[in-house]
Image (cartoon, rainbow, N blue to C red):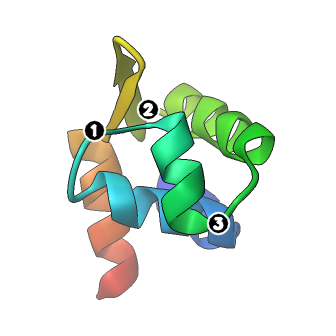
Amino acid sequence: MKAGSIASNPGKLKIMNLLAKKELDAGRIAKNTRIPLNIVKGLLDELEKDGLVEQEEGSYRATEEGIKALKSLKM
């Protein structure tokens, strides 16, 4: 289950919580989460491969599937 991928990594959870609210670029995500940029980029790549986030013109946003996975963790 993809929610498990988010739950197993606190960094992914922080990123998903941010991206569920608004689109951000990797630099702003790093600043808001206080996670180093190189780690943020790696986590975003993993989240994108899992279909939980998508990127367009440098900005990332949570996909519908990503929002559903995040909500399932909050239940």
Residue 51 image label = 2
User: Which amino acid is tagged 2?
Assistant: Gly
Task: Determine whether, in the image, residue 19 is placed left or right of residue 8.
Answer: left
Percent x, y of residue 4: 58, 65
- Let me know if residue 42 appears in the view: yes
For disc 1, the neighbor class at 10 Å (few under 14, some 14 to 19, many from 20) is some
Task: Determine whether, in the image, residue 67 is placed left or right of residue 53.
Answer: left
Between 43 and 26, the one lying in front of the other is: 26
Between marks 3 and 2 in the image, the one whose residue lies nearer the viewer: 3
Percent x, y of residue 45: 63, 29
For disc 3, the neighbor class at 10 Å (few under 14, some 14 to 19, many from 20) is few
User: Which amino acid is tagged 3?
Assistant: Arg
Q: Earlier in the sequence, mark 1 or mark 2?
A: 2
Q: Is residue 36 above or below residue 37?
A: below
Query: How far is disc 3 from disc 2 in space, using C-alphas?
Result: 24 Å
Task: Determine whether, in the image, residue 6 is placed left or right of residue 41.
Answer: left
Which residue corresponds to the image point at 67% horizontal and 35% vertical from the top-left? 41
Percent x, y of residue 44: 58, 37
Q: Is residue 66 above or below residue 49?
A: below
The reply to whether discs 1 and 2 touch (Cβ–Cβ < 8 Å) is yes
Q: Mark 3 — residue?
A: 34
Can you tell which quarter of the image residue 58 is in? top left
Q: Mark 1 — residue?
A: 63
For disc 2, the neighbor class at 10 Å (few under 14, some 14 to 19, many from 20) is some
Query: How far is disc 1 from disc 3 in space, using C-alphas?
Result: 23 Å
Which residue corresponds to the image point at 42% horizontal and 41% vertical from the top-left? 52
User: Which amino acid is tagged 1?
Assistant: Thr
Q: Is residue 64 above or below residue 59?
A: below
